[in-house]
Amino acid sequence: MADTTFGPGADQRLTLADTRESYLAMTRRKRMYGGILLVLFIALMASGWSVSEERNAGGFVNGVPQLFDFPAEVFSEAWRDRANLPGIFWEHVPALIETVNIAAVATLLGALMAMSLSLLATRGLARWPRLVGLFRRTMDGLRAVPEIVIALVLIYVLGGGPVPAVIAIALHTGGALGKLFSEVAENADLKPVEGLASVGANWSQRMWLGVIPQVAPNWLSYALLRFEINVRASAILGFVGEGGIGHDLKLAMQWGQGRYDNVVAIFALLFITIVIIDQVSDHYRNKLVKGT
């Protein structure tokens, strides 16, 4: 009669003691690797702290007591002139609207760029499969360069104003959203695409009718999230002469004492705007993705 026993022989079967020993050995290895990583992390932190202390104008520990001196001065002056805050709010609303417009236009342009790049860089959907790597590296390059660096370069070409800010944020948004859009597109069902191909649809038609309807809710969700980030980015770019409320904030801080009420008003406007955008976009993201 043939031996139909599967697995190790009777003399090779693992006992409970062997299993326990194997588990303990695996646990010891994990703890050892974790300990090595912890030691490396602590060494890097200590090294970085030492370099920072040497290059810093003053010691961090010595400066801790003065950490809240400037915020206290700003808020005390703003509280003293609190009666002026409502008027200051309205004074900076046009600059705030400009900042939101910069973020909105840049997000729209970046999302359109990301749609094209993501479909061209997605394996199984790409129009030119051999160029997938090129399009992926293009997205890597776009999101690797910070918006402020792109804006500083464009200032020399186009001068100050909102246009360089829109271009800088749009380019960075195209790279960042392109990566996210591509990951969503990779999980799309290919059956509609194959069906459209069987009846002679070209690549654009297959993408528009077979892929985009599947990925549109997630794409829109990511675009709304990116819009929140771009509002903050457009405010920061105001510090380098790109207009908007960031430029007003820079001027108020440069004036120093006597304009701190403007600083507090601008920060409050930015905070309220970002909270409103966050709440609205979160509501619509839930409706798009979860249908609730």
Image (spheres, helix red, strand yellow):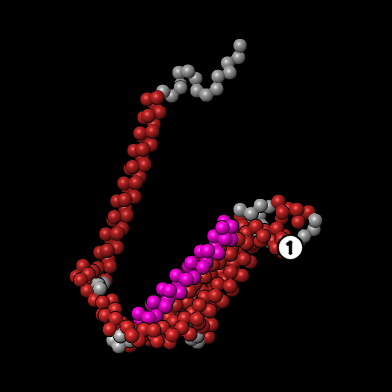
How far across and down, in percent of the image, does residue 135 sit? 60, 64
Left or right of residue 106: residue 254 = left
At label 1, which amino acid type do we have?
Answer: Gln
Left or right of residue 22: residue 190 = right
Q: Observer-nearest residue: 47 or 283?
A: 283
Q: Observer-nearest residue: 285 or 226?
A: 285
User: Which residue lies at the image location 38% right of the left edge and 33% below the top edge?
Assistant: 23
Answer with the quarter of the image where residue 62 lies. Answer: bottom left
User: Which residue lies at the image location 32% right of the left edge and 83% below the top edge?
Assistant: 82
In magenta stretch: residue 276:
yes
The residue at the far right in this view is 199
The residue singled out by tag 1 in the image is 205
How far across and down, in percent of the image, does residue 114 sit? 59, 67
- Which segment did they paint magenta? 263-292
- When the figure is inspected, residue 57 is found, relative to residue 188, above or below; the finding is below
How far across and down, in percent of the image, does residue 280 sit? 51, 68
In magenta stretch: residue 290:
yes
User: Which residue lies at the image location 43% right of the left edge and 87% below the top edge?
Assistant: 91
Q: In which quadrant will I find the N terminus?
A: top right
Answer with the quarter of the image where residue 246 lies. Answer: bottom left
Left or right of residue 212: residue 47 = left
